């Protein structure tokens, strides 16, 4: 029996080592940058990291300010871009980032990206507050229905994301979710691969629960009051004069109308009469999608928003 | 609980550890642990149906004891029929009630009369066909005086519900498995290692071969009118390997796990796709069910001892019943009847037992004649599988109509080369290992580092090619 267990243990160890090597060589996982929460309570990345995206075709980089992508050469005529995983854009090479395409369209301006997957609208506003120190002439904030609903703690309570308590009108800062586990997972690539392929629910909230919440939260009528409180809060607590809210395609027009009625500038992206902007098995935009998005934004900025 | 689930990978080491911790001298405690573990294993799916197994266990245990006490034939017969009635009654209700009602209503409608009987919303208890046949073999063998009843209720409970083979076989005979519950089981390193190897091969068959073939078989069968004949043939080919990988994979895992606990289960598959005729195929496919029907149905009916008419009748009965055992659908009955039609010419010309040895024994390659024989046999099974896989008879007929057109010689429209390479690797491995109980049984002659590299490669393939987890097909039977 002892020999059996010894052999099993040895075999498992060997299998894990070979698996780890195989996963690292083939880049079957995307490398994941490590996160920190800075002094302002903003969840961003450790500066100066780099890693491979899935398959190893290209690398992502985290700049010295802790955000994905390259920093602009100059901060004059600066336009900052804030968003979630769409703008973080690890799945595409650096030349397919919004800043690159916008720079091509608007060479007299410089662009700075601050994006992180999972940010809510209220978190984007907190990030914008920090970035205001760079004195941008404009800040483009990418958002969508989900980012708005997830900003409101009473609709869906998420501990790892910054949210607004609409009852008390206070910001509830997000906490790092299982930082220890994440560190182990990201260091051991095989474990992370297995975790991705065979996900296990470690939180209290079940998949079914979150599905139910999503169904509920998707109803604008149910949540209109809370959404209005959120947008009013944004209007009253942040400098919104230089902010432009870019809505993902098919965003709820009712929400956009609230933004407009409160005097906030908006752009609704429109993919109609165009080929798909997204990957086949991933809703994120491809290089083509990013180029089209940048075209629509630059056209709008040039035509009416930049004086 | 499925063998290919994370739950089971936690469950198995715990039960294994506790089992050997109890020690091989304490047989009763070990049996009790097996019974509890088996009920947990089954209850994980739906605890309500545990009562069915328990009831079936109680009935057959009691009848077994009474059968032993009485010598009066009429009383013995009555007891046997109670056992058959209870077991087949449950099976008939849960599995066939709706089918009979639907067929009855259809028949009346055919003759222009309406019959208002509603079908019921019945959930089929997983594995009911398997454990029903297993417990039936117990009472029939006692009735035939081939077996003495056990007085150890816990041992009998463990025998009926033995978790490795509870839900999808192999269908064990009481004469083989039950005595093992009353003997001391000692841990044997070589057997345990062999068991694990068989589990590994079974998982590979299920996860890499069956689940990946299923993906394409499902696409092609669901949209069969959109594809040409050659693609439909490939769809049937994928299903042939899906069902083989799935079911024989399950059997390998069941047998392998049993070995870890010191039990020896019957072999259920013996490389059936290398058969040179249909008779050989049926000696190599789902052996535990084929031999069950042979011993408890075919032989009592007279077998092949009578005249031609009796041979034809008995052959049809055994194949049609075997088809019907798989499910309450006319497709299974036609599948059985088709196999009877394949088998009869061999039986009537006394050529049903000419291929009893291993194909190309001691050689690396088969002869051209053997290749031809194997190809024809495989093709015949492929056609029969279409009925087995189809949703209903008209689906199967439409599939065959679209298959046998000139487009059979057109370019295949779906060609997943990676999956086909894996199937080819699987066929080659099975061919090279066909003299063993399972394909990689005789791998011991290879040096350990290479052997382990092979095992690790299989594991990496499993993780790389894990698709959506598919339930084992035979759970529904």
Image (cartoon, rainbow, N blue to C red):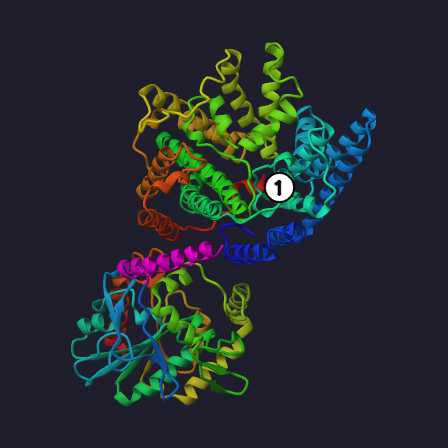
Front-lying residue, A113 or B149? B149
Quadrant (top left/top right/bottom left/bottom right) for the C terminus of chain A: bottom left
Q: x, y (%) of residue B415?
A: 32, 39
Q: Is residue A198 above or below residue B98?
A: below
Question: What is the span of residues highlighted in magenta in the rendered image?
Answer: A1-29
Q: Is residue A71 left or right of residue B329?
A: left
Report if residue B470 lies within the magenta region. no
Q: Residue at x 47, y 37 (%)?
A: B243
The chain holding disc 1 is B
Residue at the front extreme, as displayed: B25
Q: Is residue B102 left or right of residue A117?
A: right
Q: Is residue B124 visible?
A: no
Q: x, y (%) of residue B338?
A: 52, 23
Q: x, y (%) of residue B341?
A: 52, 19
Front-lying residue, B58 or A215? B58
- Residue annotated with mark 1: B180
């Amino acid at each position: 029996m002892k020999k059996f267990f010894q052999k099993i243990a040895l075999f498992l160890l060997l299998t894990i080592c070979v698996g780890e090597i195989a996963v690292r060589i083939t880049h079957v996982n995307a490398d994941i940058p490590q996160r920190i929460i800075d002094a302002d309570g903003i969840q961003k990345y450790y500066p100066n990291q780099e890693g491979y995206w899935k398959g190893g075709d290209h690398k992502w980089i985290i700049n010295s300010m802790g955000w994905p992508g390259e920093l602009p050469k100059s901060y004059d005529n600066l336009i900052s871009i804030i968003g979630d995983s769409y703008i973080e854009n690890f799945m595409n090479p650096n030349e397919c980032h919004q800043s690159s395409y916008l720079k091509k369209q608007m060479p007299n301006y410089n662009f700075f990206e601050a994006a992180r997957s999972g940010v809510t609208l209220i978190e984007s506003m907190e990030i914008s507050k920090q970035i205001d120190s760079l004195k941008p002439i404009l800040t483009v904030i990418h958002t969508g229905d989900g980012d708005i609903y997830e900003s409101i703690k009473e609709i869906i309570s998420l501990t790892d994301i910054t949210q607004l308590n609409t009852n008390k009108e206070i910001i509830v800062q997000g906490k790092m979710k299982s930082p220890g586990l994440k560190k182990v997972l990201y260091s051991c690539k095989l474990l992370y691969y297995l975790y991705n392929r065979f996900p296990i629910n470690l939180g209290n909230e079940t998949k079914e629960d979150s599905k139910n919440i999503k169904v509920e939260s998707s109803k604008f009528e149910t949540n209109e009051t809370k959404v209005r409180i959120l947008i009013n809060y944004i209007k009253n607590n942040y400098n919104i004069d230089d902010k432009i809210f870019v809505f993902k395609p098919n965003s709820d027009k009712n929400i956009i109308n609230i933004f407009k009625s409160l005097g906030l500038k908006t752009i609704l992206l429109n993919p109609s009469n165009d080929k798909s902007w997204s990957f086949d098995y991933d809703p994120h935009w491809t290089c083509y999608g990013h180029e089209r998005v940048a075209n629509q934004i630059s056209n709008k900025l040039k035509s009416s928003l930049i004086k | 609980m499925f063998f290919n689930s994370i739950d089971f990978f936690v469950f198995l080491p715990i039960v294994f550890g506790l089992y050997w911790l109890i020690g091989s001298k304490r047989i009763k405690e070990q049996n009790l642990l097996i019974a509890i573990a088996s009920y947990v294993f089954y209850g994980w799916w739906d605890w309500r149906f545990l009562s069915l197994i328990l009831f079936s266990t109680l009935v057959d245990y009691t009848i077994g004891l009474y059968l032993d006490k009485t010598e009066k034939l009429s009383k013995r017969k009555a007891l046997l029929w109670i056992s058959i009635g209870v077991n087949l009654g449950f099976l008939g209700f849960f599995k066939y009630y709706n089918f009979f009602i639907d067929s009855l209503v259809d028949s009346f409608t055919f003759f222009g009369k309406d019959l208002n009987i509603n079908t019921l919303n019945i959930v089929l208890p997983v594995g009911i066909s398997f454990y029903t046949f297993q417990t039936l073999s117990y009472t029939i063998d006692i009735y035939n005086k081939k077996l003495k009843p056990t007085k150890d209720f816990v041992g009998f409970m463990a025998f009926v519900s033995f978790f490795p083979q509870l839900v999808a076989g192999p269908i064990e005979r009481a004469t083989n498995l039950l005595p093992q519950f009353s003997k001391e089981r000692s841990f044997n390193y070589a057997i345990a290692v062999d068991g694990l190897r068989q589990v590994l091969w079974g998982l590979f068959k299920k996860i890499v071969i069956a689940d990946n073939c299923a993906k394409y078989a499902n696409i092609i069968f669901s949209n069969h009118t959109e594809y040409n004949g050659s693609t439909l043939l490939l769809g049937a080919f994928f299903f042939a390997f899906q069902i083989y990988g799935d079911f024989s994979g399950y059997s390998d895992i069941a047998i392998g796990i049993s070995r870890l606990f010191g039990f020896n289960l019957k072999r259920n598959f013996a490389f059936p796709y290398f058969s040179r005729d249909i008779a050989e195929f049926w000696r190599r496919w789902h052996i535990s069910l084929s031999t069950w029907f042979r011993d408890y149905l075919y032989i009592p009916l007279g077998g092949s001892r009578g005249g031609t008419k009796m041979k034809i009748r008995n052959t049809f009965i055994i194949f049609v019943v075997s088809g019907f055992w798989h499910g309450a659908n006319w497709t299974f009955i036609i599948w059985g009847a088709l196999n009877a039609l394949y088998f009869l010419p061999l039986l009537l010309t006394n050529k049903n037992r000419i291929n009893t040895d291993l194909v190309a024994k001691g050689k690396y390659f088969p002869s051209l004649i053997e290749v031809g024989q194997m190809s024809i046999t495989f093709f015949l099974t492929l056609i029969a599988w279409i009925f087995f896989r189809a949703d209903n008879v008209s689906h199967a007929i439409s599939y065959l109509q679209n298959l046998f057109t000139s487009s059979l010689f057109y370019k295949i429209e779906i060609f997943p080369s990676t999956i086909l390479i894996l199937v080819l690797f699987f066929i080659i491995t099975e061919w090279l290992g066909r003299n063993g109980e399972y394909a990689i049984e005789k791998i011991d002659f290879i040096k350990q580092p290479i052997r382990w590299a092979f095992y690790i490669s299989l594991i990496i393939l499993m993780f790389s090619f894990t698709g959506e987890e598919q339930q084992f097909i035979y759970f529904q039977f």
